[in-house]
C-alpha cells in the first residue's frame, strides 16, 4: 500500500539512504531491518500528524517500568477478560475510567529471528493512545529479568529466549511496533497461555477484597447476629461463661415469704433485647479450656534385631528384588515444569517408592493419581532408569 509521507518524513528518509549508500553485502539484511523500523516510526508520525484514527495494528507497545500494570485501548487484545466497575487510572491531565482487566498475548521478536508469545496483565482503558507493557508485573508472575543499555532493552524470558527492544529516538523509550498477534495466532496459542489475572498476586481494587475482622464480634462478621455480637463482647470483657452473662442480662426475681415477689432490674443493660435469650455462639478460648486429655490408644512396637534385614536375605545383585510402596499427600504439589498453575486436580497427590534390596537405591515417582495406569507407567520409567544408568534389569 503506498504511503503518503510528509516533506519532513521524506527528507529524513533521503538522508538515511544518503548516509548508507555504500552497503556491504553481508550487512544488507541488518540494514533492511533498521530501515523497516524507521518506516514504521514514520508511519506512526504521519498518522499522529494527520489525525488518523488509531487501530490495533498502528498502536505501538511501550516497555514502561513506571507502569504498575499494562494498558490497552482495545477489547480485542484480551484472551480472557474480567469486567470492572468503579476502577480509575489517574494521569497528569485527567482521571480515566477502566472497563475491565484481563490477559493479553503479545507477540515479541527474539534475537534468534523468530517470534515468541507471552501473556501479560493489562487494564482495558479506551481513552489511552498507546499500549503499555509493565515488565515488573510480568517478571513477578512469570520470572525473567532485563538489562537496560544506552540504545535498547535486553529482556530475558524464563525459557531463555532474549527479546531486544530498541529505543525510539523521538520519545527515548523502548518501543515495540506491531506487537499484536493475528486472530489465527490468538486462537492457536491463546488457550495454551495460562491466565495472568491472579487475585491473590495483584492488589487491584474491585478484583479481590479480603475480609479481615479485627475481632470475632466485629460488625463485618456476618456469621453472628447483633445480639450474639453483643453477648460475645460482654463475655470477652467479663471473662465469665456466656450462660452466666445472659443471666445477668435478665430481670432478677426474688420470692419473699408472706409478701409479693421482688423484681429487680438486670445487672447488665443490653442494646439488643434478645441478647439475653439468643443462642450462645462458639468461643475458641472456651473450647480450648474445656478440652480433656484422651488416650489415643497408640500401640508401640520394637524391631527384633534377629529379624533385621530378613527381607533382603539372599538378594546379592542389584535388581534381584525391589520393594515398592505408595504414599498419599493431602497437600497438592506442583509439577516440575510449568508455572505451578495447573490446578489441584492436575497436581501431584502422592506417588510410589521403589527401593532396591541389594544397593539400597531409593527412587520416588510422583503421581497425580494412584491408579493402575500411572503406577504402571511409573514402574516402566523406574526400570528404564535402572537400565540406562547401570545396565540393571529388574527381576522381582
Image (tube, helix red, strand yellow):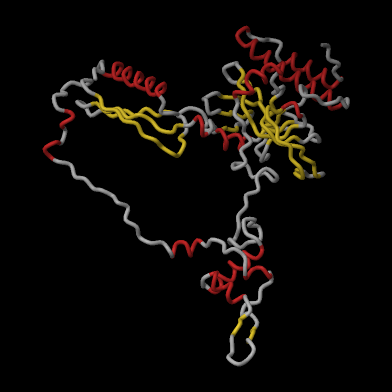
The number of callouts visible is 0
Left or right: where does residue 350 sit relative to residue 358? right
Residue occupying the point 29% across, 16% down: 387
Kindly identify the residue that appears in the image at 47 percent across and 36 percent down. 332
Q: Is 361 displayed left or right of 229 in the figure?
A: left
Is residue 90 among the parts visible in the rendering? no
Whether residue 249 is situated above or below residue 374 in the rendered picture:
below
Q: Position of residue 245 (x, y in %)?
A: 57, 73
Front in this rendered view, residue 263 or 181: 263
- Residue located 41% across and 21% down the image: 373
Residue 65: x and y in percent read: 65, 38
Where, by quadrant of the figure, is residue 278 drawn?
bottom right
Considering every residue shown, the one lying at the far bottom of the view is 258
Q: Vertically, is 248 above or below 82?
A: below
* Depth check, front residue: 155 or 286: 286
Position of 125 with respect to 235 (left or right) is right
Quadrant in which the N terminus appears:
top right
Could you say which is closer to the camera, residue 185 or residue 213? 213
Q: Residue furthest right?
A: 50
Amino acid at each position: 500500500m503506498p504511503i503518503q509521507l510528509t516533506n519532513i518524513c521524506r527528507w529524513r528518509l533521503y538522508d538515511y539512504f544518503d548516509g548508507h549508500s555504500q552497503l556491504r553485502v553481508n550487512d544488507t539484511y541488518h540494514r533492511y531491518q533498521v530501515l523497516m523500523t524507521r518506516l514504521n516510526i514514520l508511519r506512526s508520525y504521519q498518522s499522529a500528524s494527520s489525525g488518523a484514527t488509531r487501530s490495533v495494528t498502528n498502536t505501538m507497545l511501550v516497555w514502561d517500568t513506571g507502569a504498575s500494570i499494562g494498558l490497552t485501548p482495545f477489547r480485542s487484545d484480551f484472551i480472557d477478560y474480567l469486567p470492572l466497575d468503579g476502577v480509575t487510572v489517574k494521569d497528569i491531565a485527567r482521571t480515566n475510567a477502566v472497563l475491565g482487566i484481563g490477559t493479553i498475548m503479545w507477540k515479541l521478536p527474539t534475537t534468534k529471528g523468530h517470534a515468541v508469545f507471552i501473556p501479560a496483565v493489562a487494564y482495558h482503558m479506551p481513552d489511552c493512545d498507546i499500549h503499555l507493557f509493565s515488565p515488573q508485573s510480568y517478571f513477578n508472575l512469570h520470572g525473567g529479568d532485563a538489562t537496560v543499555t544506552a540504545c535498547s532493552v535486553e529482556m530475558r524470558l524464563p525459557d531463555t529466549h532474549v527479546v531486544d527492544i530498541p529505543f525510539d529516538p523521538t520519545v527515548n523509550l523502548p518501543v515495540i511496533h506491531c506487537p499484536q498477534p493475528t486472530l489465527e495466532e490468538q486462537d492457536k496459542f491463546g488457550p495454551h497461555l495460562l491466565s495472568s489475572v491472579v487475585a491473590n498476586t495483584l492488589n487491584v481494587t474491585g478484583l479481590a477484597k479480603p475480609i479481615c475482622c479485627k475481632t470475632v464480634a466485629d460488625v463485618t462478621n456476618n456469621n453472628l447476629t447483633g445480639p450474639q455480637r453483643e453477648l460475645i463482647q460482654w463475655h470477652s470483657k467479663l471473662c465469665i461463661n456466656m450462660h452466666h452473662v445472659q443471666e445477668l442480662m435478665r430481670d432478677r426475681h426474688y420470692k419473699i415469704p408472706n409478701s409479693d415477689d421482688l423484681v429487680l432490674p438486670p445487672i447488665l443493660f443490653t442494646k439488643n433485647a434478645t441478647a439475653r435469650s439468643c443462642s450462645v455462639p462458639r468461643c475458641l478460648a472456651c473450647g480450648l479450656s474445656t478440652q480433656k486429655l484422651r488416650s489415643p490408644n497408640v500401640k508401640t512396637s520394637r524391631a527384633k534385631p534377629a529379624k533385621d534385614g530378613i527381607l533382603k536375605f539372599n538378594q546379592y545383585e542389584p535388581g534381584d528384588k525391589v520393594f515398592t510402596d505408595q504414599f498419599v499427600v493431602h497437600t497438592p504439589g506442583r509439577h516440575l515444569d510449568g508455572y505451578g498453575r495447573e490446578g489441584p486436580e492436575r497436581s501431584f497427590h502422592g506417588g510410589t517408592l521403589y527401593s532396591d534390596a541389594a544397593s539400597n537405591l531409593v527412587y520416588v515417582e510422583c503421581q497425580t493419581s494412584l491408579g493402575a495406569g500411572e503406577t504402571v507407567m511409573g514402574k516402566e520409567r523406574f526400570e528404564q532408569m535402572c537400565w540406562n544408568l547401570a545396565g540393571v534389569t529388574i527381576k522381582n
